[in-house]
Image: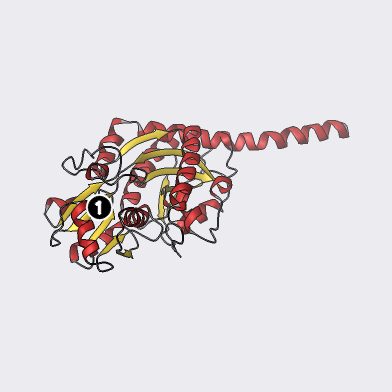
């Protein structure tokens, strides 16, 4: 065998190696990073997806919680991970479409360092009041806040979160001032609201649900274009005369590090879409008052770019907002 033949053989084997690696994927457990605390909605939904992927991929998909820095800590970990399909990210929209506008030194570039695998679902945000507070509508909250400027407080699940930004945007739109109190997740936020440390809170439907049923919390309004099936008696912000709150509905998505081979991304995307569109997933997902979307990678990327453009306009209306 001459030198030229050996060289051609070596090149052929080198070119085949990545293809072989991708065809055997996955050959070991997959780590699914959730940049939020355990027990919250993101963690619960991530475990539903991980359960489905474990069955579909033939390898364990292990959830690892990495909370901190408004969900950017865990997100950065995946963005910097080896792009081999063994480190994935399951997150809300906060560190993806809001962090680029709220963090001065964001340790990742969303468009370059992450690939959208699947848009999983969307859920409305809800404005809650502690039942001891004599406020039963958005109008009454506005009137109370204007009568006591800077005295009322509302909680969110972190600086720069959808909940925080909704509170600031609402305050600007209706001309009120409230004290923002950030918490490290939805659970501690709602615990503080039930305990009376804050008067109001903005969160999703899932965690506060039992307290609403017990009469300890009162939902005042929901984001989105229509009422939630989980809280059909609660009007939207628009129904109460406050427009522009529709975009403030967090979504969940699955991401891979930038540079992950397309074959791996496509497989993960296809399997995730199957999981999300299954009746079993939809039924369990509905507990959160959420709508399953199940977009593939291509559609998710288009949606991501649209969201980034939309949030650029929202932040333009909030000049000087300090989140760090």
> Is 13 situated left or right of 178 in this image?
right
Between 322 and 217, the residue placed more toward the observer is 322
297 relative to 92 in the view: left or right: right
Q: Is residue 104 visible?
A: yes
The residue labelled by disc 1 is: 127
Mark 1 lies on a secondary structure that is strand
Which of the 4 quarters of the picture holds residue 187? bottom left
Percent x, y of residue 189? 28, 61
Q: Is residue 187 above or below residue 59?
A: below
Q: Estimate the x, y position of residue 60 in percent, counting from the top left.
A: 42, 44
Above or below for 301 versus 164 = above
Quarter of the image for the N terminus: give it: top right
* Picture layout, residue 187 above or below residue 297: below
Query: For the point 28% across and 34% down, which residue is it?
Result: 280
Residue 230 vs 12, above or below: the answer is below
Graded by Cα atoms within 10 Å as few (under 14), some (14 to 19) or many (20 or more), the crowding at tag 1 reads many
Which residue does the image show at 42% across and 36% down from the upper left?
A: 272
């Amino acid at each position: 065998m001459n030198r030229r033949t050996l060289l051609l053989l070596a090149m052929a084997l080198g070119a085949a190696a990545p293809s072989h690696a991708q065809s055997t994927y996955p050959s070991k457990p997959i780590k699914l990073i959730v940049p939020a605390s355990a027990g919250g909605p993101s963690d619960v939904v991530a475990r539903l997806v991980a359960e489905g992927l474990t069955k579909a991929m033939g390898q364990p998909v292990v959830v690892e919680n990495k909370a901190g820095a408004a969900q950017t800590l865990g997100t950065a970990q995946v963005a910097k991970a080896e792009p081999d399909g063994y480190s994935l990210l399951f997150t809300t929209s906060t560190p993806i479409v809001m962090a680029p506008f709220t963090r001065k030194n964001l340790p990742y570039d969303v468009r370059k360092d992450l690939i959208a695998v699947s848009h999983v679902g969307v859920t409305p945000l809800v404005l809650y009041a502690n039942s001891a507070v004599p406020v039963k509508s958005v109008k009454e909250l506005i009137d109370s806040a204007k009568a006591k400027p800077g005295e009322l407080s509302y909680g969110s699940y972190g600086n720069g979160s959808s909940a925080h930004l909704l509170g600031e945007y609402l305050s600007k739109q209706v001309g009120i001032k409230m004290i923002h109190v950030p918490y490290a997740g939805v659970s501690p936020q709602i615990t503080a609201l039930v305990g009376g440390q804050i008067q109001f809170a903005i969160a999703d439907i899932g965690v506060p649900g039992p307290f609403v049923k017990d009469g300890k919390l009162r939902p005042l309004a929901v984001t989105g274009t229509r009422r939630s099936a989980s809280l059909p008696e609660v009007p939207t912000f628009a129904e109460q005369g406050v427009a522009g709150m529709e975009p403030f509905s967090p979504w969940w998505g699955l991401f891979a590090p930038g540079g992950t081979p397309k074959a791996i991304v496509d497989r993960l995307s296809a399997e995730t879409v199957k999981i999300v569109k299954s009746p079993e997933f939809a039924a369990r997902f509905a507990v959160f008052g959420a709508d399953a979307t199940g977009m593939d990678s291509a559609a998710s990327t288009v949606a991501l770019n649209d969201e980034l453009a939309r949030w650029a306009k929202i932040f333009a209306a909030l000049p000087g907002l300090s989140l760090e």
